[in-house]
Amino acid sequence: MFFERPQMLLLLITLLIPIVYIFPKIKQIDSSPYFLFKNKKVTRKFVKNMQGMLYVRSILFMLAWFCIIVAFSGPYWGKEIIPIQKNGSAVSFVFDISWSMTAEDVLQEDSSYISRLDASKKYAKSLLLPNKTDDMVTVSVVLAKGDGYVAVPSTEDHEAVFSVINALSPNLMTSKGSNIGAGIETAISTFPTSQARQGTIIVFTDGEETIISLEKALENAINHGIGVYIVGFGNPKGSQLQLGENKITTFLEEGKIQKMISNLKNKTSLYNIPLYYSKFDDNNYELLKILYPKDFNLQESYQNGYEVKKVPRHNLFILIAIILFVLGMFISYRKISLSKIASVSGFLLILMMFSSCSYNVKESFDLLQGNFYWHQKKYQHAQMKYLQILNSSEESDNQELKQYATFALGSSYVMQNEEEAAFQRLESVAPNAPDEIRFASAYNIGVLSYSVGNYEKSIQSFRNALMINPQSIEAKINLELALRQGSKTVQNNKSQVKTASENKEHSVLKDAVFSIIRENEQKQWKSQEKQDEFQSPTDY
């Protein structure tokens, strides 16, 4: 179990109040002068029953208070698979550079032998195809020996990656032994938590470990929604390796790796996270499909990735607290009438209905929760919610909610600098969508087009926005800016964009992105007498 706000658990100390103060008072009831002298009709049995009722009610209230405290502490347990759209690929190469990788037992096409490490270099460079910058494959390089070390952080500069790969050697790290798991754990840390790319770890190793950590690291990668591909190098039958004065036999631990992967697949079969092993001489077709899905006409299937998240359980504790409180209230009555039983039953039925509410109510709540994440700048969490809403709205054929979710998803991509994905979502807003959605989509397309230097599209988008809402001052200002930039030469455009991006921390572009948000916040407080006035729809 994990608690988001564990400091709230300190309130559990308040449970000592009924134990120290209330329970002793209940115990003293039977010795009260009122019951002993003033009320002769009260029997000892009645007093005992009342004491029991008060004890039970107090315990129920204590349990309800306990559940409320736990709920506010943010409990999580269990795991769930969340679909999330991925655009582009983020790959981490993990190279085992232990001394066993220097064994020369990898056969080449010319019948010569090279070392396992040299073969892994050659294999890795074959995966980074030239002239594939449109796919925006970011690559990081991690070295694994006695520990894990990031040699190249995540980058699109493949030349830097090539230079590091060419220089790989066991002498690069002074730590001893082989710790492949530490390399995978380090690779996991190279993926930003808010990224919108499909993360994949490719491990180049012979599988020999002096520190047993591979299986645990693989499971951790799956729990982060990151696929792992292990490429084995070496001879399963063993090869002789001279280390100083000693000669040792080193193997490709193929069977151990395959058994480990099989166990993990059975354990995590519902996660849909790729986990595979292949040998160095196998076809690298599967890896190329992951890196370059567009070249294999797999754009749609590889855009939808998965992330494994802990399941929040605060709603469960709140529901239990309400039930315990209601039971504590009604147990105070010695005689429960049919009307009271019906009232309690009806109340619990309403709670059950809310806990399994209809699509419309649930989707609206998810949309509100996504907006909450968006305003907290937790754009990855907001993106997950919007994707869930989009999928469920398509199932329930709720077109209006679908358009809201489409725009909100595009807005989350804008804030993550995922221009291509943002364009795709914002341009897919239907022509029959509500005016506020169409306006906000056209407005944000104009801002994005301006940011990438497509001033003609920016001008047209701002004009489309003004056709929907002619009263928008921000759209008029941004249209004028786009017209001025469009009239200048290409050379001036480049220099001015560069100057703006380097010297202006709060540029006009950033102000334009947030202007629609400010407009909505201002208008939502206007009086109801101005309901016909157009309101900006960025915040959903």
Image: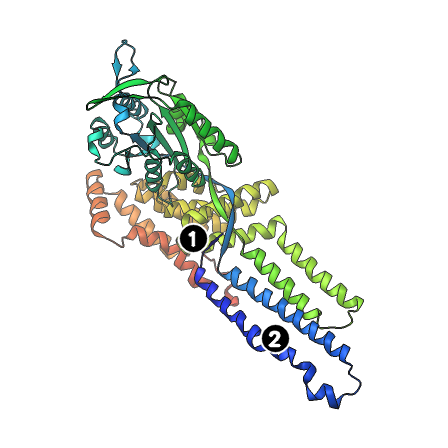
Which amino acid type is marked by label 2? Phe
Answer above or below: position of 344 versus 439: below
Sequence-first tag of 2 and 1: 2
- Within-10-Å neighbours for mark 1: few <14, some 14–19, many 20+: many
Which amino acid type is marked by label 1? Trp
Counting every numbered tag in the picture gives 2
Determine which residue is flagged by label 2.
23
Answer above or below: position of 125 versus 480: above
- Residue at 41% in and 27% down: 257
Q: Determine whether the residue tagged by mark 1 lies in a helix, strand or loop.
A: helix
- Residue at 27% in and 38% down: 150
Q: Where is residue 478 in the image (x, y as percent from the top left)?
A: 33, 51
Q: Which of marks 2 and 1 is in front?
A: 2
Nearest the camera: 184 or 85? 184
Q: Position of residue 134 (x, y in %)?
A: 33, 31
Q: Can residue 497 be seen in this view?
A: yes
Answer above or below: position of 313 versus 43: above
Looking at this rendering, what residue extends furthest in the top direction?
111
Residue 364, disc: none
Q: Position of residue 184 (x, y in %)?
A: 35, 36
Residue 374, disc: 1
Q: Quadrant of residue 32?
A: bottom right
Nearest the camera: 487 or 172? 172
Q: Is residue 432 visible?
A: no
Q: Position of residue 298 (x, y in %)?
A: 45, 27
